[in-house]
Amino acid sequence: MFRKLILAPALLMALSVSTGVIGTAAQAQDTPLRIEITDGVIEPMAIAIPSFHGSADMAAKVRGVVADDLTGTGLFREIPAESHVATPASFAEAVSYEDWRAIDAQAMVSAEVTQNGDNISVRFRLYDVVSGQPLGDGMQFDARAADWRRAAHKIADQVYVRLTGEKPYFDSRVAFVQETGPKNARIKRIGVMDYDGANILWMTDSSSLVLAPKFSADGRKLLYTSYDSGFPQIQLMDVATVTSRPLTIDQGSMAFAPSFSPDGRWVAYSHENGGNTDIWLMDVATGAQRPLTTAPSIETSPSFSPDGKRIVFESDRSGTPQLYIMPIEGGEPTRISFADGRYGAPVWSPKGDMIAFTKQLGSTFHIGVMRTDGSSEKMLTQSFLDEGPTWAPNGRVVMFTRVTPGGNGQPRLHSVDITGRNMRPMNLDFAASDPSWGPLMP
Amino acid sequence: MMNIATKTALTGCLLALAACAQPAPPVAPPVVDPYSNVGGGAVFQGNLNGGTLGSQATAQYFQGTVGDTVLFPVDQTTLTPDARTILARQAEWLSQNGNFTAVVQGHAEETGTREYNLALGARRASAVQEYLVAQGVAPGRIRTLSFGKERPAETCSDEGCYAKNRRAVTVVNDTGAGA
């Protein structure tokens, strides 16, 4: 049922494919080619990705994914092949920078894909056309042919890192909930897919209502809420074997909204008893549980800081739902949201400096971000119902659920850059909600 | 994969308690919506004296005639006078039918986050449970859970539907233990 996607740490074998120009090329430039991601309007960088050399079919597929990854960020514009002047005959051929400058390319990706039975080997180089030099080392990726998309994502990640200075994120996966059936009897099941919607794996069947999967920091576990017992309780799933066990079994109370600590040792979640919902903390190894809040108000949606020391959560103790931060030991929380509206579903950014959240203002919903002290609040989206943000592993992109109104309303996954640009629906042919973006894969 | 087959039957029942507790009758009873006063707040218009004593001891009767649903104002979990009237009838029925247990399901409208609505539904279910207990129903006979915004009664996206989705539904289950 479950195909193992990760080929051990040896998937990625980086080595220089030629000598001489490697290593110091980037440093030699006065101003390395770089696209700055700022809040202002940007002009996408013009990039040429001529046909990859080698095994034709596989080379074309890998090239297509590399191009989709890069242009999908909104930061790059691919120059169509029809306009190319240069037609390199091989990967080793010297680059004719003049020909690429002639079509106003700023960067050029060259690669060779060799398929050998069940294995592929991909070599690539990135060129700074403007200064006429290679940008960074050449690299080689060896992978199973079945993992060709991962190899393509690794190349695109390298290009993205070198041209933006940001960390990579294309080679990552997203857990989500597929929704089928009518709105008043929705059938839900949990899936895991590549960040771009490919390679979907179904993790649960549709016999139980399931909600809000959350990846562990290493991507090997999923927490989710299931009505399997008839009452909402938390399940812990091993992703590789697709086996689950109940993490909470508490007759007469509900447990939901679970979230892992970065080290995977703790799970913070909402524990309901007698109608009151507080944040509780569980030691995963021992199952020992204790409350972190003991307020008569609603406390839910806990999310850990990347250092594991603090938890941001939602509470209506002030009268409306707002965002608060407390130490992992519990104790007096600090309120961080103060503007108009109702705030919920906070998620701490991978860099640790930002909180993404859902905000309801009047009859519209927004996905927003703010600094952890509540400053620099900024709305990224607006619609009838946007909710449940999750961060890309590099903290540059947020994925969320957008629900359309009405009896035929459907949830769809969307992503948006944290500058608020490049809002786009995920390329899925079914309704889905509750995305959880996993880590960059090794 | 998980042991799906063993779970399916049980889960189906638990997700639709009423349906499983009561095998479908050979002839479906006439559908009567006791809350036909749309937009003006829930006013129960069902028949208080319908049926014989024998036929009153069914989940069907509880649902259709006693009234299994109470509604809540926006973002509120307190019981309105209308809700208390219905719950008093529920308590009376539960007192007369001691072989039944109840699960109170709390619900919320679709605006609001998934997690907050789960907690809000739990508050609503608990408010109903507490009222029934105050009316003399043994606490052990009533359980609560919340579906948040997962199981709306009405599917449109305006206040007419939202008003019917902010609800707590009491689902009774014949334990066969005898009165």
Image (cartoon, helix red, strand yellow):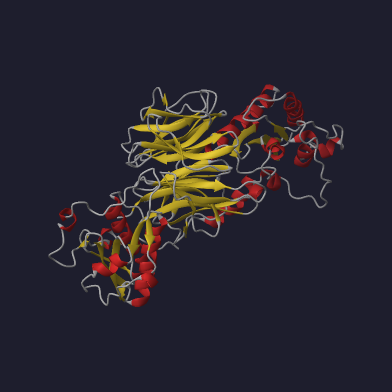
The image shows residue A42 at horizontal and vertical percentages of: 38, 49
Q: Is residue A8 placed above or below A343 in the rendered structure? A: below
The image shows residue A134 at horizontal and vertical percentages of: 21, 62
Q: In terms of depth relative to the viewer, which is nearer, A256 or A253? A: A256
The image shows residue A350 at horizontal and vertical percentages of: 34, 42
The quadrant of the picture occupied by the C terminus of chain A is bottom left
Q: In terms of depth relative to the viewer, which is nearer, A209 or A440? A: A440
Q: Residue at x 51, y 41 (%)?
A: A233
> Is A326 left, or right, of A224 in this rendering?
left
Place residue A383 in its image quadrant: top right
Q: In terms of depth relative to the viewer, which is nearer, A280 or A119? A: A119
Q: In terms of depth relative to the viewer, which is nearer, B163 or A372? A: A372
Across the whole image, how many numbered discs are drawn on residues?
0
| Residue B177 visible in the current orientation | no
Q: Residue at x 53, y 56 (%)?
A: A205
The image shows residue B96 at horizontal and vertical percentages of: 77, 30
| Residue B135 visible in the current orientation | yes
> Is A185 left, or right, of A69 in this rendering?
right
